[in-house]
Image (cartoon, coloured by chain):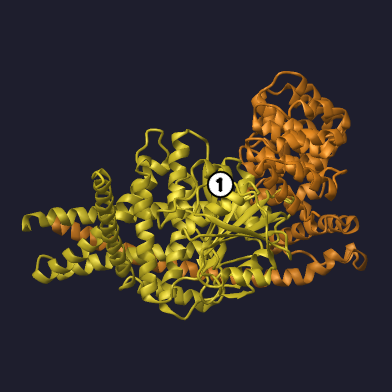
Chain colours: A yellow, B orange
Amino acid sequence: MIEYFPLVETFILLYFIGLNGVYLTLNVLSISGISRYMQSRDVSGLPHLFAGFAPPVTIVVPAYNEEANILNTLRSLFEHNYPEYEIVVVNDGSTDRTLEVMKKEYSLAPFPEAYRTRLRTKSVRAVYHSTVDPRLRVVDKENGGRGDAVNAGINIARYPWVCRVDADSILQRDSLLLIVQPLLEDPTVVACGGTVRVANGCKSEDGIFVEADLSRKPLVLFQIVEYLRAFLYGRMGWSPMNAHLIISGAFGIYHKETVVAAGGYRPDTVGEDMELIVRLHRLLSEQRKRYRITFVPEPICWAEVPDKLGKLGKQRIRWQIGLIESLMMNRGLLFHDKGTFAGWFAFPFTLFFEWFGPFVEILGYIIIITGFMVGFISVEAFTTFLILAIGFGVLLSISALLLEEMSFHLYKRPWHLLVLFVVSLVENFGYRQLNTVWRVVAVFYYLRDKLVSRLTSRKQADRLRTPAG
Amino acid sequence: MRSALVLTIAYWVSVAVVVLVVFLMSYILVLRAVLLLRERRYRELVALWRPILLNSGEHDLDRLPAVKPADRHSFLILWNMLREEKDADPEIRDWMNRVAVAVGIDRFARQLLEKRGVRKKLLAVVTLGQLRDKSRWDVLCQMAVSEHVLLSLAAMQAIARIDPAAATPLLVRMVMSRPGWPAAKVASMLKDIGPDLVSEPLTAAILAAPDEEKQRLIPFLETCSDATALTAVRRILKEPHDDKVIGPCLSVLGKFRDKQDLKLVRQYLSHPRWHVRAHAATCLGKTGMKEDEEQLVALLNDAEWWVRYRAAQAIVNMPFSSVERIHELMGALKDRYARDILTQAVAEKGLTLP
């Protein structure tokens, strides 16, 4: 056992170098990408550039038990300064009064929609339209999950671009105008995501974002730095290579026909937003189509994040299961011979560092601590590796803060910066490790569910094979 | 020995990381300080110049305050923002152009054009276009054919503003050769130049283009004069072409609504490609006559949803359609899908049937 120790140690070291090496490369790519974006921002911000030519958009809002949020969301969506759009809310079998509050506020009346099932969904009970504002229609359907609900919205959408917005997302008045810019600049774009930031603590009025501020809760602060890392160099770094594998369900725009041709959202996965994007990469590269899946670095969507540990844990486990399912369902993309950066770089990176990574990290912690305790690792070595690991963690967070400062600097007050500096340091003592544990737990849940479903289907198959009587 | 080496490397890397972290933190603080300073200066600049730029009658050109060299870039951004905002007001437009020349911003823009950064170049290009400054025409023409999409578009727009007649041949050539240019932006530039200058060269170029390019280019005919566009479309439809070309042609016919084309449009109602049938139905909804109603009703039974939908919209939107007539048609429909789609189109239009 002991003779394997140096081997394991070397593997963990290589893993550490690889992971941080890729992150630092993404960081450098993001700095150049953000600089380019900011260069054109002054001029493309001038109203003339795309005035009057924004494509009509259908906004689809899946809603399950959103009684508390849905009216605010709708109010904010009606405030958009966008020339032509319609809103389709899909009430996904809510058990609360989501439908009733909308009926009352927007005088919904049954609408004789010739419903066209292009994507299969759970059955639709009724379609309503607002007699107050003709831009609003509501689909009332049986519960089938978020993906299923968005599919129903796509079936009923009248416009060629579908924008998916979560019912609790907070947008800006110009969010839609900003998210369509890449479609106007590049006709090969089939999907575009918006940068999501943490809404907790921020000021908003009637569902419209007003001003960024920091929450007082440490758990939320950790997530603010995490979101900065994820969006400013995670996605910005992959974007120039057309290789990012996820568009957040909170806010993203899709070319309807491309999504329909790909079969829409899969209702049988918890990470339907990531799965769709990975599938689009797979199918479009298989078909050798010229396409781009891109994103807008401008912060245009604000989402409430969990402020309780239990909720956060559940969310992270769900995300990790979604990631694993997305990769497994589209494993054909990995090193695909009609190769793209998504298949040759982003997919293997995600597979190795995001899926298997947590195990290596946990193993690393165990080995270093055990090695130190039993005397295999000296105090100097232990301290050095600790400083190195934490140092890289802080470096990545601080460079995300640098990107934010170079670009949008939304956290205006000087104390905001100081708090974020402290959070970048403190999150390395417990928060990151907790995330790793949740991700490992998620893998076990995933394997357990897989096993159960395999056993169930085998039993069902056996039962079918058994002659009646 | 090996472990000692690894430890030494790890030690120095960790020192480097810590130094880098401290450096980045300090750099962020410096950036913030610079930003706050810049924002304060910009606020002062706006407070001083906004009233001057927007009140043409109240200020004397000879008594304008000077723009400090450090503020020229910010001034240029403010000037461009307001210039865009007030583009519809010729008096303010003219006044702002005179102010720009009086404070030497035109010279500054010409200097920026020679700089390396794209941001500076873009700002210069837009400004020179707004000022109708011809002195850097050749440089702008070179930029218009550059690989950088935003820069080439901005330069093209600038030269189209400076001298529309001289810009048209280059614009048409670029429209043909740059499929990557956003169609919306191209249409906007063609519209700005106007049908008098654009119609002939654009039509000639589209007619000479191969079929796979025609599909992309035909929608731009909507920016031409009706006579030229319709002649071109009729000519294209007379010859055998890829089916994908027919849809955009029918769209153009629908836009100009010439009854003369009715016969041509009707023949596409039974086309084997559903896209063409849907386009033909929409076009007929705009230009059709009473006798076309029967053919549109027949399309309500089409196997393709979009054709049924467009036919239903056409029936409801025809100028002579009435609630009574639609009610009568609905009663006569035997197919459930046809009835459903017509009911939807009626509801969308907000009509109430008896």
Q: Nearer the viewer, residue B25 or A85?
A: A85
Left or right: B90, with A314 as reference point:
right
Q: Which residue sits furthest right? A: B57
**x, y percent for residue B320:** 88, 43
**x, y percent for residue A174:** 66, 61
Q: Nearer the viewer, residue B22 or B111?
A: B22
- A240 shown above or below A93: above
**Placement of the N terminus of chain A among the 4 image quadrants:** bottom left
**x, y percent for residue B291:** 85, 33
Label 1: few (<14), some (14–19) or many (≥20) C-alpha neighbours in 10 Å: some
Q: Which residue sits furthest bottom? A: A216
Q: Quadrant of residue B180?
A: top right
Chain letter of the residue carrying label 1: A
Please name the residue shown 88% across and 66% down the image.
B55
Please name the residue shown 38% across and 50% down the image.
A326
Question: What residue type is disc 1 on?
Answer: Thr
**x, y percent for residue B83:** 80, 57
Left or right: B213, with A252 as reference point:
right
- B265 shown above or below A198: above
Q: Quadrant of residue B93?
A: bottom right
In terms of secondary structure, where does tag 1 sit? Answer: loop
In the rendered image, which residue does mark 1 sit on? A117
